[in-house]
Amino acid sequence: MTEEFFERKREWSRWKHRLLQRYLGHFSGIVGSAHPTVYYIDGFAGEGRYKDPPEDGSPVIAAKIAADAVAKGRGFTLRCINIEPDGYDELCASTAAFDPSLVENRKGTFADNLDSVLETIGKNPALFFLDPCGHKGMEWDVVMRIVERARVAITEVLLNFYITKIDIHGGYLRSTEKQAAKFVAGLDALFGTQEWRPIWDGTPIQEQRILKLTDLYMDRLTKAFAAASSHGITARYAVKTIDGNLKYFIMYGTRHPRGARAMSEAVFRVTMEYEDARAAAVQAALDSAPQQSLFEAESRPTEEAVDAAIVRDLIPAILALSPRQRRFKLADLEEALLTAWFGRAIEKHFRRACIQLIEEKKAQIVNPQPVATSKKKYRVVIGADTLIELL
């Protein structure tokens, strides 16, 4: 990982690290209720901290979560393994203040360390964070060794699919430059197949090409998780710059629906924070302009307006489940729509959509539950065990 990368944290890195910060605590808490030891493996840890301004990188973020679990007397231990070939000394310095029993740094590439890591973590629950500065080191056979672990142990993967750079490397497919063969072979290894080649050749429009290439990888990842576990779940989310341009896709895989719902909520929450930051950045740019702009900044919708729009769009997706799936609880509903709505809606939106469907006589409650309190916001109350039927 280059030293220049750690001079300043880009906004898309800040989004990604905020997601890790939100989710890792949830993941370790969920599985830690039944397992005394939980592992977090940062396959491309870097130097641990950004320099100007000083900000925590993923290894320090995870170490703080691990230390916090100890300080609060949680019934589990979160152990962090960081791997870095180039900035290893800086990584060690960044994490020196943490208990060595919680944080372990290893020098070298992720692929070279993977056998040893798998032996160390055994069958303990583990979250792998794969975030290289590109895609080197994240070859398909390496990722599949992690996915295969899901057969015997709780295994989750959060990876950065850097599609904009992948697309650039795909441009060497028909190049006569000396380094072209190296770039093409790198993409063959990343996808684990040459199926990306006709996609790149046959899709001249970049926006369409990027989506098709991402679909190919996602489809293969989904099948791999399904083969490793009958409950395998995968999802993706497009991460954009403050200017709204696609930067990369975050991809996530697990075999546990509860974890998938927690990750989806984490993505949603961080995205809302990101949108607030984007609106503030636009306003700040206008405020600092030497003369008054002819255009006003686009106002950020209120939380209520955002929620209403999500519920409005969610209702047709719920109705489309019938007749394939007519009865469900909230968790079942979230799981059924997870892939399409990953990071776009959380439990309150599914609940409100169901309430609206019931009030419109398009759904009904099969097993009415007693209401625990008289202070209810809606005429219809839906709990975790409420069974809903589409009409």
Image (cartoon, rainbow, N blue to C red):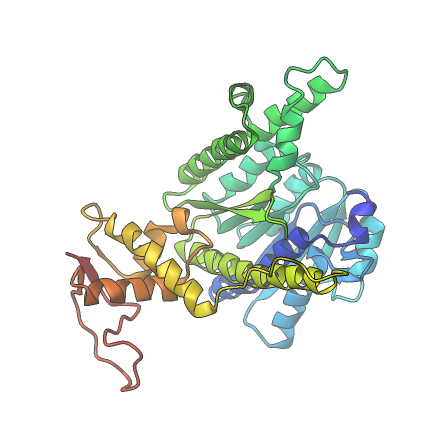
- Coordinates of residue 315 in the picture (x, y in percent): 29, 56
Q: Is residue 203 left or right of residue 293?
A: left
Q: Is residue 102 visible?
A: no
Q: Depth check: 324 or 239 in front?
A: 239
Residue lying at 41% horizontally and 36% vertically, measured from the top left: 227
In this rendering, the answer to whether 323 lies above or below 75 is: above
- Coordinates of residue 250 in the picture (x, y in percent): 56, 46
In this rendering, the answer to whether 60 lies above or below 87 is: below
Residue lying at 35% horizontally and 50% vertically, measured from the top left: 337
Can you say which quadrant of the picture contains the C terminus?
Answer: bottom left
Q: Is residue 331 left or right of residue 244?
A: left
Residue 201: quadrant of the picture: top right
Q: Residue furthest bottom?
A: 374
- Coordinates of residue 369 in the picture (x, y in percent): 21, 75
Residue lying at 70% horizontally and 65% vertically, measured from the top left: 287
In this rendering, the answer to whether 18 lies above or below 118 is: below
Q: Is residue 275 left or right of residue 363?
A: right
In this rendering, the answer to whether 219 lies above or below 287 is: above
Residue lying at 38% horizontally and 67% vertically, measured from the top left: 348
Q: Depth check: 129 or 83 in front?
A: 129
Residue 69: quadrant of the picture: bottom right
- Coordinates of residue 31 in the picture (x, y in percent): 49, 61
Q: Depth check: 249 or 71 in front?
A: 249
Q: Is residue 327 visible?
A: yes
Q: Residue furthest top?
A: 176
Residue 111: quadrant of the picture: top right
